[in-house]
Amino acid sequence: MELEQWSLDAIEALAPDASSIKAASKLKMPTKWQQLAINERVIWGLCKGSGQNPYKTQIDLQGPAFKCSCPSRKFPCKHALALFHLAVAESKEFAQDLEQPDWVTTWLSHREAAISRKENPKPVDKKAQEKRKAKREANIQEGLIIVSDFMEDMMAKGLADFIANKGEACHAIAARMIDAGAPGIANRLNKLALLTSQSNREINILHTLAELNLLVKAMQRIETINDPKLVAEIKQQIGLLVTKEEMAEQPAIQDKWLVLGSRLDDSEEILSHKVWLMGENHRQFACILNFAHSSQRGSLPIGWNAPMVLEGSLRYYPSTMPIRANIDGAKMVGHYQTLNGADTLNDAYQQAMTMKRENPWISTIPVCLKEIQMTAFNETLFVSDKQQNCLPLEVNERQALGLLAQTSGKPKWIFAEFDGDKLMPLTFANEQTIFTLESIQ
């Protein structure tokens, strides 16, 4: 990514914790640095520390990736965060014609070698790979028998018994499916247990159970399915990864991609980052989903936010309803001013149900709405259209007040994720600007 793609908020989002942001704030002054320099690839600086020698801090913009000679185990450290902030906020303080020092060149060389090894791995032992694959699928099929028996037993006893026991049987079976190599099944079982303590639990449990049962039956009959895209979708839902070779077989789509919205889930040790795109000419949604350990936050494309426009080559994962995708060589080429959307909630709902029919395991569906207004009722914020249809927005009180204030209750359009019951908004537009939900948290 290029430097101009980064906002100060996006840089702060890279921090491993709040204390790192606070510590970095004390270093966001050029006087704290003995040297500040930048070229088209890397930022580097020498930060005054408590010792005799300054800390050598460097940022590879092609990652971004960070390295610092300080003893901190946090990543990126306070020095890297401060250096990145200064490069964006006070670029005039950085020398642009300074010769790149050896310690920067050496680090970049090591990174290039690591990238090369990753892109050109050692030849795979096909026979051993096929043997492992066959063993895993056999373990999955054995586990699915247990899941199927569990569901039959659950329905025989009734939902009241399942809810009373808080779905405790789910966790043991989920652990069994993790061991079998089917994390997708395990996630759905754990979700069933969580639903026992939520509102509207009966209907939500039945919906989740129906999707799980359909997935189990489909996987048990996988050899009889002739549609390769459906087979690929079922295996992905089970948790079997698409290989690099399989992705390389998918057609590459070159286009300009509008960044519709993004969401970072940092509630767990493993971070989940999602970016929604739409092709300027392709006109289809695409979801870029990445995962990283909390210590590797900087490896995620957190700088991709609406209303950026990226240019790059995108490939969809094989599916009956392609949505998840990878994008290569993405670089920012501009910003968009407006976005088209459905005129009514009913139109958006019909589009969503069409996608759901093609792939019944889709959990969240992207929707864009225009000509709507927002109204608060009983501490819940709703959107309604000109036909008086309405849906609740999943926002907290602070976000609701901010949205009403910035849009006067009548946004030009919103982009959101739809789960069948409510909208989880990501991006809004008023008459003057486009802003994200995260910006008003």
Image (cartoon, grey):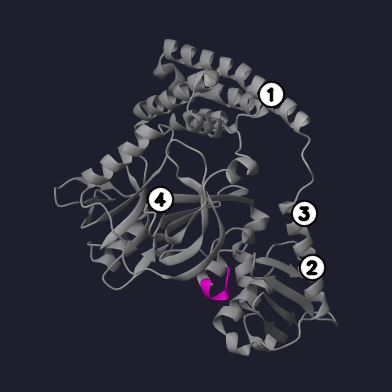
Instruction: Decide if residue 256 is in sight here.
Output: yes
* Disc 2 + disc 3, Cβ < 8 Å: no
Query: Where does residue 54 sit, x and y in percent of width and height?
Result: 80, 81
Contact, mark 4 vs mark 3 (Cβ under 8 Å)? no
Placement of the N terminus among the 4 image quadrants: bottom right
Residue at the extreme right: 52
List the residue tagged with mark 2. Answer: 109
- Residue placed most toward the observer, 346 or 128: 128
Task: Tell me the magenta residue range.
Answer: 1-6
Mark 2 vs 3, N-terminal side = 2
In the image shown, does 419 or 330 lie closer to the viewer? 330
Q: Is residue 420 visible?
A: no
Tag 2's secondary structure? helix
Dot 2, how many residues are within 10 Å of its Cα: few (below 14), some (14-19), or many (20+)? few
Q: Of the two numbered discs 4 and 3 on the same chain, state the one appearing first in sequence.
A: 3
Distance from disc 1 to disc 2, alpha carbons, whole Å, reads: 40 Å
Measure the C-alpha gap from mark 1 to mark 3: 28 Å
Which labelled disc corresponds to residue 134? 1
- Identify the element where label 3 is drawn: helix
Residue type (three-letter) at the residue carrying disc 1? Ala
Can you identify the residue that label 4 sits on? 285
Identity of the amino acid at label 2?
Answer: Ser
Front position in the image: 168 or 265: 265
- Which residue shows up at 43% across the image and 24% down it? 209
C-alpha span from label 4 to label 3: 32 Å
Residue count near mark 4 (Cα–Cα under 10 Å), binned few <14, some 14–19, many ≥20 = some
Is 405 on the left-hand or right-hand side of 273? left
Q: Which residue is mark 3?
A: 117
Residue at the image point whose x is 29% and y is 73% from the top: 432
Looking at the image, is 4 positioned above or below residue 211?
below
Determine if the magenta segment contains residue 3.
yes
Which comes before the other along the chain, label 4 or label 1?
1
